[in-house]
């Protein structure tokens, strides 16, 4: 007998989901095995939150729909932080959540899973009956992939166990919206008249990088990205890097000096605009997005263009006349020598033999690691260093699960991204607090044999808090120094404490080897000042 659980797995496999992650319990045992039986790769995680974050990172990096499978009730609630991050980021993740049956009103697992899912921004869906199962799965998948939404598909246990009949399915992706002609003409006119145009590309522009660069070349625009699109313009001589809190001083100066800023698939959050300070008072702001609710949601814009970024770029490219714009020899020379944080000298401070400057650490790592890398960054005071100093080859080389700003997601993020791009060196950049919070997934890295470099910026505390609350009692946010390298060795990883740049020789040796086990760098970083981006962020509060 074919069950509904088997039908759900076979339909999702036929639709072409890329990878499944989860923690298997009695409620999702059969549907998970159905996915596996029909060829969907499955990675068992050690915690449901880790599984959800892995799926989020895999989908961001690969561009494919990823699946999370969860037990009913507590399995879903354990995963909620990861689901919230994915939902806020509009990541196409399909959560297959078992649910209690209609008659199990007194089950200890029973919660209102629809309301729980909706409360964190995910789209609740349900397999209602054996007769509707195929249609229900197709509807959930269509919303997930077609609208780039995180969908929680609840599958009650009694429905899962019922007889079901598979049926052929076909997903027809919706046509990307094209902008109207009047908006295209107005944007083209603004670009033709602009003397200092800047493009800021966000997540919605990740599939249009080359076309955007060609349009920027035509109208003399400088190029920048939001944090989540970091790497989109790697190698372009007029690339300013990340806009916002991670921006170099030069990037901030040039963006603020723009007379026209065009946000391509970027929502212009307070982080991207430094609480609005990065946009000049007289700057004309244009926002291009395919979602009506996103236009002008974060700040007022002078022109809102509703349309797919790639489609809009093509139409505008055909309408612009072009010009030199912002690209002068003087600015080009400055970008060449000041355009990256790694080119900025590390401040001269008294030597601390027990602690390494996080800037010096990051500069040394950037020079040491191969160019083909995927960098995943957790949240915390340290996060600006790897984000700004570690170059990435393209937008797929940077995975930044920060829409919810939870610490503890970075290691799972790196796993999902590594599985999406096994051809690259995965680098997990974490704080000590986030590493210890998500440490269960270190076993997953070791078990899978991923040659991952895990860099812990270890300041023995929650740095954002003890830097923010100056003059206060920090007992609750400072901790005894821990030997994280030894802890990693206990999991089966290599580990090395780093207090000076020369200690990274162990990393060089690991890189030259087979990399059959991860390497953890316990970088004992100085904690006597907040990172520059954190100081900037706190000024905006």
Image (cartoon, rainbow, N blue to C red):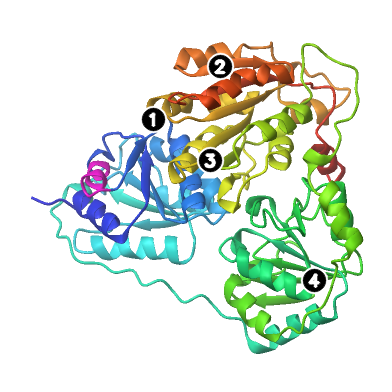
Which range of residues does the magenta coloring cover? 31-39
Mark 2 in CB contact with mark 3 (< 8 angstroms): no
Circle nearer the N terminus (2, 1): 1
State whether residue 489 is above or below residue 337. above
In 3D space, how far apart are the residues under numbered discs 2 and 1 (Cα atoms)?
17 Å
Residue picked out by circle 3: 81
Nearer-the-camera pick, 15 or 485: 485
Q: Which residue is depicted at the point 61% across and 71% down?
A: 309
Mark 4 in CB contact with mark 1 (< 8 angstroms): no
The local crowd at label 4, few if under 14, some if 14 to 19, many if 20 or more residues have their Cα within 10 Å, is many
Point out residue 365 in the picture as x, y percentages from the top left corner: 67, 30
SS under mark 4: loop
- Left of 210 or right of it: where is 424? left
Nearer-the-camera pick, 300 or 119: 300
Magenta stretch: dominant secondary structure: helix
Residue picked out by circle 2: 495
State whether residue 390 is above or below residue 338. above
């Amino acid at each position: 007998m074919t069950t509904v659980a088997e039908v759900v797995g076979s339909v999702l496999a036929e639709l072409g989901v890329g990878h499944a992650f989860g923690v298997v319990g009695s409620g999702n045992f059969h549907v998970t095995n159905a996915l596996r039986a029909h060829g969907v790769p499955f990675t068992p995680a050690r915690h449901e939150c880790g599984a959800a974050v892995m799926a989020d990172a895999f989908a961001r990096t690969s561009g494919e729909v990823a699946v999370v499978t969860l037990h009913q009730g507590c399995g879903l609630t354990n995963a909620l932080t990861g689901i919230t991050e994915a939902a806020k980021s509009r990541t196409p993740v399909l959560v297959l959540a078992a649910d209690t049956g209609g008659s199990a009103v007194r089950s200890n697992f029973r919660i209102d899973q629809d309301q729980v899912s909706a409360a964190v921004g995910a789209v609740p869906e349900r397999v209602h009956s054996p007769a509707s199962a195929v249609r229900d799965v197709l509807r959930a998948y269509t919303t997930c992939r077609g609208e780039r939404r995180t969908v929680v598909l609840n599958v009650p246990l009694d429905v899962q166990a019922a007889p079901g009949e598979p049926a052929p399915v076909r997903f027809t992706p919706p046509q990307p919206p094209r902008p109207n002609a009047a908006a295209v003409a107005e944007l083209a006119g603004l670009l033709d008249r602009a003397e200092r145009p800047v493009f800021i590309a966000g997540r919605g522009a990740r599939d249009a990088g080359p076309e955007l660069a060609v349009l920027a070349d035509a109208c003399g625009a400088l190029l920048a990205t939001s944090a989540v699109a970091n790497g989109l313009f790697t190698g372009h001589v007029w690339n300013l890097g990340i806009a916002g809190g991670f921006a170099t001083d030069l990037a901030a100066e040039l963006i603020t000096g723009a007379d026209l800023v065009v946000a391509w698939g970027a929502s212009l959050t307070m982080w991207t605009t430094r609480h609005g300070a990065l946009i000049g008072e007289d700057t004309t702001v244009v926002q291009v997005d395919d979602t009506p609710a996103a236009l002008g949601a974060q700040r007022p814009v002078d022109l809102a263009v509703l349309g797919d970024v790639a489609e809009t770029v093509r139409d505008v490219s055909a309408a612009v006349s072009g010009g030199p714009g912002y690209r002068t020899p003087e600015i080009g020379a400055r970008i060449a020598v000041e355009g990256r944080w790694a080119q900025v000298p590390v401040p001269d401070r008294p030597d601390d033999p027990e602690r390494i400057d996080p800037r010096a650490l990051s500069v040394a790592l950037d020079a040491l690691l191969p160019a083909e890398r995927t960098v995943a960054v957790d949240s915390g005071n340290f996060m600006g260093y790897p984000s700004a100093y570690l170059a990435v080859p393209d937008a797929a080389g940077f995975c930044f699960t920060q829409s919810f700003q939870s610490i503890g997601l970075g290691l799972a993020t790196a796993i999902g991204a590594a599985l999406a791009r096994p051809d690259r060196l995965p680098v997990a950049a974490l704080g000590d607090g986030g590493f210890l919070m998500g440490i269960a997934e270190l076993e997953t890295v070791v078990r899978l044999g991923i040659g991952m470099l895990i860099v812990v910026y270890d300041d023995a505390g929650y740095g954002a808090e003890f830097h923010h609350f100056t003059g206060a009692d920090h007992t609750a946010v400072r901790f005894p120094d821990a030997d994280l390298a030894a802890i990693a060795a206990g999991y089966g990883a290599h580990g090395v404490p780093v207090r000076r740049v020369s200690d990274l020789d162990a990393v060089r040796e690991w890189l030259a080897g087979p990399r059959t086990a991860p390497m953890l760098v316990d970088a004992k970083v100085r904690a006597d000042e907040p990172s520059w981006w954190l100081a900037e962020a706190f000024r905006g509060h």
